[in-house]
Image: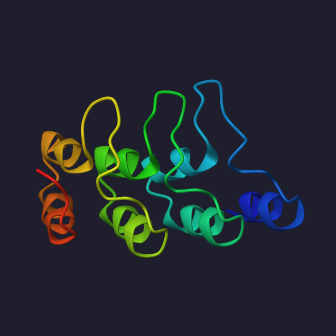
Amino acid sequence: MEVVKYLVEVGKAEVDKARNNDGLTPLFMASNKDNLDIVKCLVVVRKSDVNKADAVRMITLIVASHFGPLKVVKYLLEEGKAEVDNVMIDGETLHVAKSKGYEGIVRYLKGKDAKE
């Protein structure tokens, strides 16, 4: 976390332009690893775009819904202003959470009026 804070706050890293070999941004990688502190740092300090698609047209909310960290899903929707029904290649956010069996995320997304 300290390295991320340094790169973001002091180094002014351009987090929406940075990508790994798979085309994933730091926000994507933090969202699928359940790193809420890093997600918050990227969204708050560097204003990382939570609705920006990666190389295969997935958005961060889809990634979080696929890997199951409910606290990241909540943060992206409530604080990051993610679009609950932003569509990607494999379907909608709710569909992804259902297919992975994440009932807590499914209930939460339904409460946010996610499309079935």
Residue name at image x 57 percent, y 51 percent: 27
**Colouring rule applied to residues:** rainbow
Q: Quick check: 54 left or right of 86?
A: right
Is 19 situated above or below 5? above
Name the residue located 11 percent from the left edge and 50 percent from the top edge. 116
Q: Position of residue 69 (x, y in %)?
A: 34, 58
Residue at left 67%, top 62%? 1
- When asked about the image quadrant of residue 2, the answer is bottom right
Residue at the image point whose x is 43% and y is 65% from the top: 76
Instruction: Give percent across and percent down for residue 72.
Output: 40, 63
Toward which corner of the image does residue 42 lie, by quadrant? Answer: bottom right
Reply above or below: 89 against 13: above
**For this view, does 115 lie left or right of residue 90?**
left
Q: How many marks?
A: 0
Residue sitting at the far right: 11
Question: Residue 40, percent across and down?
Answer: 57, 69
Q: Is residue 34 above or below residue 112?
A: above
- Asked whether 78 or 31 is in front, the reply is 78
